[in-house]
Image (cartoon, helix red, strand yellow):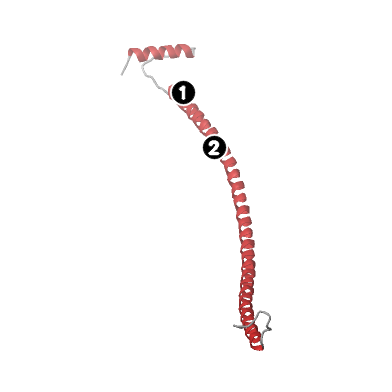
Amino acid sequence: MAGRSSHDEPTNSDIVAMLGRIDLKLKDMDKSLKRIESLEIKVDNFDKELKKVWLHLDKFTNEISDKVNRVEHKVDSVDIELEGARRRIADLERDKDKLKEDMNYVQSQSMRNNLIFGNISEVQDETPAKTEQIVREFIVSNPR
């Protein structure tokens, strides 16, 4: 081509050389296209796998959420029952204290009623108040 005028037509060898270069370019483009297609297949497969993972993760998240909701419900129920049990325990402790006081009172009354005094003369038709007065005087005059 060197030394030719611009109006000259290309020779067969020029055309064959040009076609050879075009063929090389087409082969390079074909290799690139095959790599792109391979990457596209890999991306599609990755997308499918990613969707499977998301579905599994979504299912797992929903299961965990349901379990957490059930546990929260149970905790709320236990809190309510615990508060009721606390109230019942407080009531029982008050009842116990009241019964203890009543028992102490009854026991002291019983002990008071069961005292035996000697050397005190008995008077017929004596009132309980008079008996108590005599016993008090006896205790004061005969301390041991």
Q: Quadrant of residue 53?
A: bottom right
Q: Quadrant of residue 131?
A: top left
* Location of residue 63 by image quarter: bottom right
**Residue that numbered label 1 is attached to:** 109
Q: CA distance from mark 1 to mark 2?
A: 34 Å
Q: Residues within 10 Å of mark 1 (few under 14, many from 20)?
A: few
Which numbered disc, 1 or 2, marks the residue closer to the eye? 2
Residue at image coords 61%, 53%: 65
Which quarter shows the C terminus?
top left
Image point (56%, 36%), residue name:
88
User: Total number of numbered labels?
Assistant: 2
Instruction: Please give the label number shown on residue 86.
Output: 2
Residue 107 left/right relative to 48: left
Q: Secondary structure at mark 2?
A: helix
Which x, y percent locates residue 78? 58, 44
- x, y percentage for residue 95? 53, 31
Local SS, label 1:
helix
Q: Is residue 4 above or below residue 144?
A: below
Quadrant showing the N terminus = bottom right
Where is residue 4 shown, x and y percent of the image? 63, 83
Residue type at numbered disc 1: Gln
Identify the residue at image location x=64%, y=64%: 51
